Amino acid sequence: MSITIAGKKVGAIGFGLMGKYSDADDFRLVTRIISMTLHFTGLTWRATPTPYDDAVKVMKAALDRGANFWNAAQFYGPPTANSLQLLNHYFTKYPDDSKKVVVSMKGCFGATGPDCSPEGIKKSIDNCLEILDGKAFIDVFAPARIDPNVPVENTMQTLAGYVKDGKIGGIGLSECNADTIRRAHAVHPLSSVEVEMSLFSTDPLSNGITKACAELNIPLVAYSPLSRGWLTGQIHKLDDIPANDSRRNFPRFQPDVFDLNLELVKEIEKLAKAKGYTMPQIAIGWVQAQGKQPGNPAIIPIPGATTIPRVEENLTPVALSAQDLEEISQLLSKISVHGDRYGGVYKRFMNL
């Protein structure tokens, strides 16, 4: 199935520029902005940052394998070394690729949370354009979270002006609810909606988000398809997660529920081995398959990666049969996921 975002064709699987354990979880960087005490990793923010030239090789490998939808953010790293500088570096080396890549950029998020005021939007977009320096076009610009202090209609009206002026190609939303999608789309067509979706986070399939996107013909971008590393095959015990890793702060990784959640991992791992795939391939394939179900929109998962072998693994086509999907459905019905996606103050910016 062909997927179009902002008027451009994109591959069935995208590429998240905030990658950790092959997982594109943007909120790790959001929490890094809010709390400078936490520890994060990725292409542009790691305990030992990935050198730009090494990151470029991974990005090139992803593009060469068809992952031309790149999901980035103004806050994926510090102000002087984030997705923007990385993209500038990449397109300086490969200028012709700017015509091949569809760039989705999240912004309007700072130390106090989302700022979707006209001033906040202007500051964010101007900063993105300045750093990209014309080397890449922002096909989709999305506020990283809904601003509870600004009606989404006002946010869309402001962003629509930037589309009209040709500064951005389209508008996206991230981590929003179905009602907000409908309200926003009524002001200006949405190019995409980005929400968390994985075998650990199936809510969009039942909370009205996929229904709204399907009715309005809006592609859904599924971030964290490997559920912060749960579905990479690299987590078998709590000690596999470093003590200073930010995931230690997330509800699903707490000691009292960790082993309970590991039960789902074990079962999915068994199924993957029986099918001849890796667990990440099954996890990503399942997300893709949801976009082919009646009543659902086109869905593009955006796993991240910091190595070429992981890119190759993530982008290997997986065709799950109806029987495979039924087996997975049975697993999900029998084994519950314990703990919320986010905890503490971060819940304030979820599903607005």
Image (cartoon, rainbow, N blue to C red):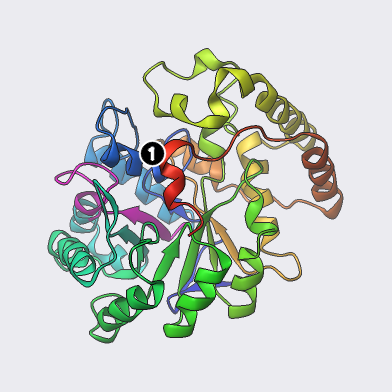
Is 84 situated left or right of 151 in this image? Answer: left
The quadrant holding residue 169 is bottom left
Q: Nearer the viewer, residue 320 or 119?
A: 119
Which quarter of the image is occupied by the N terminus? bottom right
Q: Nearer the viewer, residue 219 or 351?
A: 351
Query: Residue 199, how many percent across, how many down?
Result: 66, 43
Does residue 31 show up magenta in the picture? no
Residue at 68 percent across and 42 percent down: it is 282
Query: Residue 195, how many percent across, how many down?
Result: 52, 56
Query: From this viewpoint, which residue is outermost toward the front?
Result: 149
Mark 1 residue type: Arg
Is residue 135 visible in the rendered image? The answer is: no
Residue at 23 percent across and 41 percent down: it is 52
The quadrant holding residue 188 is bottom left
Query: Residue 96, how many percent across, how many down?
Result: 27, 66
Query: Residue 30, how many percent across, how many down?
Result: 34, 44
Magenta extent: 67-87
State the residue position of label 1: 28
Does residue 83 show up magenta in the picture? yes
* Number of dots carrying numbers: 1
Q: Is residue 213 above or below residue 350?
A: below
- Assign a secondary structure to mark 1: helix
Residue at 84 percent across and 42 percent down: it is 330
